[in-house]
Amino acid sequence: MTAGGMSRLSPGDTIGVLGSGQLGRMLAIAAARLGLKTHIYCPESGPALDVSVARTRAAYDDDVALSAFAASVKVVTYEFENVPAHTAEFLAARLPVHPNPFALETAQDRLVEKTFINGLGIATAPFVAVDNVADLREALARLGQPAILKTRRMGYDGKGQAMIRAGGDLAAAWVAIGARPAILEGFVPFVREVSVVAARGRDGAFAAFDLNENEHANHILSVTRAPANVAPDTARQAVEIAKKIADALDYVGVIAVELFLVIENGAEKLVVNEIAPRVHNSGHWTIDGADTSQFEQHVRAVCGWPLGSPKIRGLVEMRNLIGDDVHDWPKLLAEPGAYVHLYGKHEARPGRKMGHVTRVAMPKTRG
Amino acid sequence: MTAGGMSRLSPGDTIGVLGSGQLGRMLAIAAARLGLKTHIYCPESGPALDVSVARTRAAYDDDVALSAFAASVKVVTYEFENVPAHTAEFLAARLPVHPNPFALETAQDRLVEKTFINGLGIATAPFVAVDNVADLREALARLGQPAILKTRRMGYDGKGQAMIRAGGDLAAAWVAIGARPAILEGFVPFVREVSVVAARGRDGAFAAFDLNENEHANHILSVTRAPANVAPDTARQAVEIAKKIADALDYVGVIAVELFLVIENGAEKLVVNEIAPRVHNSGHWTIDGADTSQFEQHVRAVCGWPLGSPKIRGLVEMRNLIGDDVHDWPKLLAEPGAYVHLYGKHEARPGRKMGHVTRVAMPKTRG
């Protein structure tokens, strides 16, 4: 079967998910609500395995295991963007993979990603490819300081990044990121970080959740609030940007677009930071705060089902429980109206996402 | 360990659930959201197995399997009231079982149940124990016609019941219910069926969801609406009745109390029909329509955790998808704001509960 021969899934069918983290776990729970089964494929143990019908523990380059996995599911999706290209292409030759390998490969490489986005006429931070310290010196001369050196691949939560300030040690920065193919990004003097979480169906239908406003701590998402505190026109533009990107990628599933909000000549302006070809931490509030969760929305999209209503239920705040934060669970469970989610991870290591809590404030009635 | 030595569970711990149906499935999903694991014990396959970490397929009188199950979990609960008394007592001697075996045994037998409820000063339908056709004749003379003959045990969704009208064939009715120990219930001329779904914590805390109004078709729940269309004082009385019963049973977990609403001398009056010592179909709307679902509430209670807020989010309607109804799933998924739940059952047999759909109408804002 080729990707062209895809047909709509039915309740009772099985979705294959690459990756076993909390995103896969919440996808599996959403799939279960809709009568679908989940088969998790991953090299390592993880919390998604606890709620899946079938589990394959194998390497991403194990073609025998991948073949058996492909034969056991109706569609493949993934919970993280660092799925090796070989894995995605091997599977896509056998059955539908959503989002498609082109979207995955575009999002995996910061240089490819930013080039692609600029090609759509959408602003990003200025950037220059850097393959060695000499490149880095030249790039700095062009972009000025401060600037951020980022590996092209495999970066997340601030990993593989180094801020370079005036007089900084370039060779040290190059070693700090692992001396790997990189880009230098010019610093964007943003006033706020926002993100669009949206879904695109197999039929091209597009539905965005309300714009998120994100606060990070130590490069890790800390708090998301929705709707973001931006001008209505800015929120509309953000959704248009996400739609343009999703359409250009022929995207199916939930996509997240992270943006910087900049004030330029007194007006709000959006600059794309990066895209995530998957459900996203800043969309976790949708489980409790929207008509349809991002996880159900992703399941609907990859199954060829109609997208659900993304309507928000009130003013929403989602707070990650990072590391030891999770030990507050008894207090959080006792808070009326707090929606507590714990991911079932064994050890609360520093920086590890252990759960989240969502609070929804209902709009006041007038009268 | 005895039931007296129970301690609060922690995230990562495992809850044992007897039964593998849709109620067990939704309990397992709620437990997963809170970082808990679920071990399902059941003689037969069922949809709860798809979302559980561990599964034991064994008979309810298999003491070896029960011992291993008890050793692998921190607390035991169940999704249906027909757990054999031996099973509950065997487990309760080893670890906490919630709700306790006394509650289970009281709810399992209509004669015991009604006697218990009347003993609390709470009205039920009039009833007489019936052990043979002669008893039945005598009972009919006392209660009048129509009346309903019901097996004392194992009845649900109208099974094990026979309506007896004037001139009816008593021997045929006795055979129809399996010639088993039974009760005859006097007919209650109710105007509406309502139910309380509420939770009682280990500490005695009590939290009721809004009163449900239930419509049945062919003895199976068809539609639940909440809040029920009754006088505020009637709703309060219903909750008081449920609390009185739960307190008297030293109940821990979610309990459902089904009641008839009767109009007597122009005033609303409540008559208990039966109690269910478990999460209940009429509480399914709480997943999408309340701050805390009945499933999460049950998990919180049996874990020794604080109860969540039972606050309703609007005017709610829950409609069961029975048998072929489930084939409407594509239409339901396309309906904005409809919350679709499918249980992952293979075959849509007539009368089988395949899923449900919840709709929530937000209260109008004034102004």
Image (tube, coloured by chain):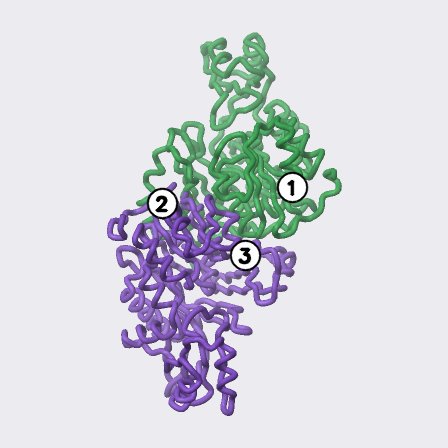
Chain colours: A purple, B green
Residue type beneath disc 1: Val
Residue A309 image offset from top left, x and y in percent: 36, 56
In this rendered view, identify the residue nearer to me: B125 or A68. Answer: A68
User: Taking A324 as reference, is A40 above or below it?
Assistant: above
Q: Is residue A291 visible?
A: no
Q: Secondary structure at mark 3?
A: strand
Q: Which residue is mark 3?
A: A339
Secondary structure beneath disc 2?
helix
**SS state under label 1:** strand
Along the viewing direction, whichever of B234 and B342 lies nearer the viewer: B342
Discs 2 and 1 share one subunit: no
Residue nearest the viewer, comparing A196 with A108: A108
Task: Give, as a three-letter code, the residue at label 2.
Answer: Ala
C-alpha distance separating marks 2 and 3:
38 Å
**In the drawing, what numbered circle is on residue A3?**
none
Q: Position of residue A292 (x, y in %)?
A: 41, 55
User: Mark 1 falls within which chain?
Assistant: B
Q: Quadrant of the C terminus of chain B?
A: bottom left
Camera-nearest label, 2 or 1: 2
Which residue bears the numbered disc 1? B75
Q: Describe residue B195's horizontal placement relative to residue B64 as left or right.
A: left
Q: Residues within 10 Å of mark 2 (few under 14, many from 20)?
A: few
Position in image of residue A184 (x %, y %): 41, 81
Q: Quadrant of the N terminus of chain B?
A: top right
| Looking at the image, residue A19 lies above or below residue A135 | above
| Kind of residue at disc 3 | Tyr
Disc 2 target residue: A71
Q: Residue at x 53, y 52 (%)?
A: B33
User: Chain under label 3?
Assistant: A
